[in-house]
Amino acid sequence: MRSSKSRSRAKNNRNRPSGGNVVNRVFDSSGPEGKVRGTPQQIIDKYNQLARDAQLSNDRVAAENFQQHAEHYLRMLSEAQREIEARREEQERQNRERQAERDRERAERQEREAARQADPAEAPQPDVVDFGAEAAAPDAGLVETPENKGAEAPAPEKKEKPARKPRARKPKAAPEQAAPEQAAADNGDAPEAAE
């Protein structure tokens, strides 16, 4: 359970402006004539009007009281405006610094680029591929393509192989001579040799 002291402290802290946007914030002011509600500028205008009315009725005490209330809100408003202006100036200063840094980097890049263009040795060089080394080392792991073949020396003309000669066959025996020999071989009789 909370103690009453912590509750009263928290309650008092709620009424204080927390550095937010005081210029547009709506306040409830408890003045001598009752509550006045509005933004700080509206409250200032209202208290100034009440102070003029009190002066016209020859009530110097009430007029001073209203002027003091108006002055309080005027101080709050001017402090908030000073903070806003300080933040704006800080932002502008940071923006100028960032812009100056970007300008410096851009100038350095342009100088480097100009130096590269002026000195070709400093310019980035393309990779050189030696196709002759690939031809000397066929096991380089590269696949030979028609484009690569065109880049090399022209291929030697292919020699045509001489036409093959048909294979010589053993001539067949004439059918008349082969018949008696075949018949004799079938009967088991061998032809008799001439004596």
Image (cartoon, helix red, strand yellow):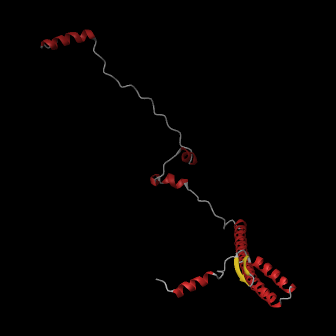
Quadrant for residue 64, please give it: bottom right
Q: Is residue 44 left or right of residue 130?
A: right
Relative vertical location of residue 99 with respect to residue 63 in this rendering, above or below: above
Quadrant for residue 78, please give it: bottom right
Residue 146 in the image: x percent, y percent?
Answer: 54, 44
Taking the view exactly as shown, the residue that stands out farthest to the left is: 188
Residue at 83% x, 85% y: name it: 54
Quadrant for residue 120, please give it: bottom right
Q: Is residue 96 left or right of residue 58?
A: left
Relative vertical location of residue 24 with respect to residue 154 in this rendering, above or below: below
Q: Can residue 126 be seen at all in this image of the molecule?
A: yes
Residue 50 in the image: x percent, y percent?
Answer: 81, 82
Taking the view exactly as shown, the residue that stands out farthest to the front is: 57
Residue at 80% x, 91% y: name it: 61
Q: Is residue 179 left or right of residue 14?
A: left
Residue 51 in the image: x percent, y percent?
Answer: 82, 84
Number of numbered discs visible in the structure rendering: 0
Q: Nearer the viewer, residue 76 or 126?
A: 76
Residue at 46% x, 51% y: name it: 138
Q: Can residue 192 be seen at all in this image of the molecule?
A: no
Quadrant in the picture for the C terminus: top left
Q: Nearer the viewer, residue 156 or 98?
A: 98
